[in-house]
Amino acid sequence: MKASRRVEANGVNPETICHTAKESIADSFVASPHALEAGELSIAKRIEDAANLNCQPASNWLARREKRSAGALFANVIAMHDPFGRAAGEPLVVAVTTPFPPNDSLHKLLVEHVPDVEVHFTRYNESRDARAARGANSGVLPAGIEVPTVDDATRAVWERAHVFVGIDLPSESETLSPDLKWMQTISAGVDQIDQQQLVRMGARLSSASGVASASIAEFVMARLLGVWKNLRSIEQHQREETWVEDFGTEVTGRTMVIAGLGSIGRQVARRARAFDMHVIATRGSAKAGDSDPDVDELHPAADLASLLPMADAVVCALPTSTATIDLFDAAMFRTMKSDAIFCNVGRGTLVVEDDLVEVLNEGHLRAAVLDVMRTEPLVEGDRLWSVPRLHLSPHAAVSLDRYQQNAWAITSDNLRRFMAGGRLNNEINLPSLTT
């Protein structure tokens, strides 16, 4: 009989071959986990027959010696191979915490990579003050800063969540969302995220660097052109119904220095070169002699001060770090040309605002453009409102008409990468765990 063809006769341990058959089943389910319930018995039987092994019959094998059910066994098999540690039949739960209007557009993208996915919109949006405080404290929320309360319905979703999509990570995430494996921010910066908390949870972090870079770069060029072409005074003359020939400055051939050739800096560089500007940039990872196709000159970050005297426009697109906080102080501003324009679309903590006010009041610099400030929102009566030649905007350089669409595209692509076991786009290298 077929059952009498013992594999020991060939000198092979039957347990080893049965284990191989089981691994083959698991691999099959990694490729198509949702065929599990309908096909688990037939797949096991096919592998047994193909190997012509004297293993236990498929039905007995699935029961196992521990008398677990077939469903429980395969749940464990799937959990071992699923990147999120899900059991068989368990959906992927995605909690969107950013305050976008709920719709099914993200679900339609994610279901292409994980058929059984739930998308829940659970708003959690910390204030700019809280984010700034976190950013200055390695992502940890200092005492005394208020954050939104989490209602019971949100807690119920977060208890099952494998993915967060948003800007803010609650301080109690280890308790609120014990199964969290990945946070996808919809912002380029991640300094507001407590990365140590994610390390303790064994979760991954990726940013949305680039999601708004094009629109921010457009804003930068609009602001610079507005100054160079005297648009503010031209509009004032119109309101006053006065005919004044207020001629501007030709941009061609001017020099721009970009502090931080990241995603935003690169988009600014491309647009500046379209205006035939000479573009010089610094990058933290650059070494002497390095080059980049999007700029005319690339320098290490340490060279910034020596480059400023050449600039007609200085654009700051740096993140917050110990090396960049208070980087632009009185000494740096006075190194610039008297008719240079300074523009900050990085972080408010990079500029010593009192020093900027001082040099502007002295008549130094043609103008300054701030889209980010140390304290946001700027309170009524703050002297920044009335400083001469200072162009303020309320952290509004980004355009929102395509922001959600771009953020969802990044999230979908990163889910594909996560399921494939690859590195995520814009994945953050998390620090080592500290005590």
Image (spheres, rainbow, N blue to C red):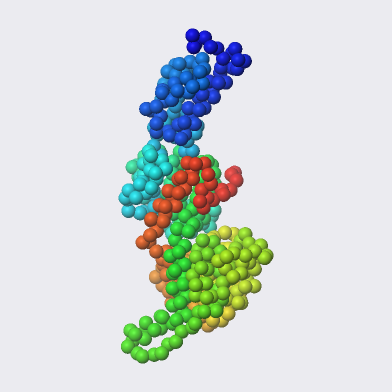
From where the camera sits, is residue 100 visible? yes
From where the camera sits, is residue 359 visible? no
Q: Is residue 15 left or right of residue 157?
A: right
Vertical position of residue 124 compared to residue 340: above or below: above
> What residue is shown at x 49% (from left), y 53% (from top)?
207
Q: Residue furthest right?
A: 288
Front one among 202 and 408: 408
Q: Is residue 124 left or right of residue 326?
A: left
- The image quadrant of residue 329 is bottom right
> What residue is shown at x 43% (from left), y 65% (from top)?
215
- Residue 274: x and y in percent read 49, 72
Front one among 173 and 46: 46
Front one among 260 and 200: 260
> What residue is shown at x 52% (from left), y 27% (from top)?
23
- Residue 227: x and y in percent read 46, 79
Q: Is residue 144 left or right of residue 10?
A: left
How many discs appear? 0
- The image quadrant of residue 330 is bottom right
Vertical position of residue 125 compared to residue 157: above or below: below
> What residue is shown at x 55% (from left), y 12% (from top)?
6
- Residue 322: x and y in percent read 59, 59
Which corner quadrant holds the C terminus? top right
- Residue 41: x and y in percent read 41, 23
